[in-house]
Image (tube, rainbow, N blue to C red):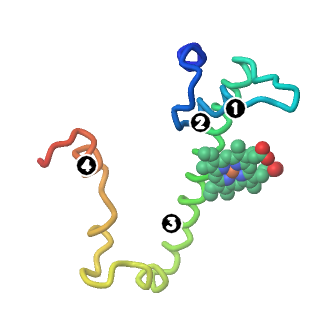
């Protein structure tokens, strides 16, 4: 992917393009290894911090049902109405309506 990006040498509106086109004050860009490391940091640090934040948020909310109820959907009163189950997500990924 890095080699493809270098060949394209264009801003494709994604993080990889930005990293490949970035230059320091002396006009020097990142090496392939540096680009790879930056992408890995974004993916792993971004995933772990977000997953931890969401996990602890739901854990804490689980201890206070009255607070959770205030955050929930008002009309149906059911969280399942907006929180998709794993099977719902799988169906959506496959693009089927079953
Ligand atoms: C709830 C989610 C997140 C939390 C709590 C969080 C927290 C933090 C904190 C505290 C730092 C500063 C670390 C330090 O300077 O010692 C940091 C830096 C950073 N975070 Fe996050 N982060 C979150 C989400 C994300 C996401 C989604 C991404 C990427 C898609 C990301 C990418 C980065 C990067 C690249 C840095 C380093 C920035 C720099 O060069 O100084 N983070 N984050």
Q: Nearer the viewer, mark 1 or mark 2?
A: 2
Q: Is residue 48 visible?
A: no
> Do the numbered discs 2 and 4 sit on residues whose CB atoms are within 8 Å?
no
Position of 68 relative to 28 (above/below): below
> Do the numbered discs 3 and 4 sit on residues whose CB atoms are within 8 Å?
no
Judging depth in this view, the residue of 6 and 35 nearest the camera is 6
What residue did someone put label 2 on?
Answer: 15
Mark found first going from the N terminus, 4 or 1: 1
What residue did someone put label 1 on?
Answer: 38
Q: Secondary structure at mark 2?
A: helix
Residue 70 left/right relative to 5? left
What residue did someone put label 4 on?
Answer: 87
Query: Ligand 1 closer than 8 Å to the CB at disc 3?
Result: no
Position of 71 relative to 12 (above/below): below
Quarter of the view holding residue 33: top right
What residue did someone put label 3 on?
Answer: 58
Mark found first going from the N terminus, 2 or 4: 2
Q: Nearer the viewer, mark 3 or mark 2?
A: 2
């Amino acid at each position: 992917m890095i080699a493809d990006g270098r060949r394209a040498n264009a801003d494709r509106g994604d993080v990889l393009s930005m990293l490949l086109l970035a230059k320091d004050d002396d006009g020097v860009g990142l090496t392939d290894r540096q680009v790879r490391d930056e992408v890995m940091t974004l993916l792993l640090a971004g995933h772990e911090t977000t997953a931890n934040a969401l996990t602890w948020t739901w854990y804490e909310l689980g201890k206070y049902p009255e607070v959770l109820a205030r955050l929930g959907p008002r009309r149906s009163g059911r969280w399942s109405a907006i929180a998709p189950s794993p099977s719902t997500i799988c169906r959506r990924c496959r693009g089927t309506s079953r």
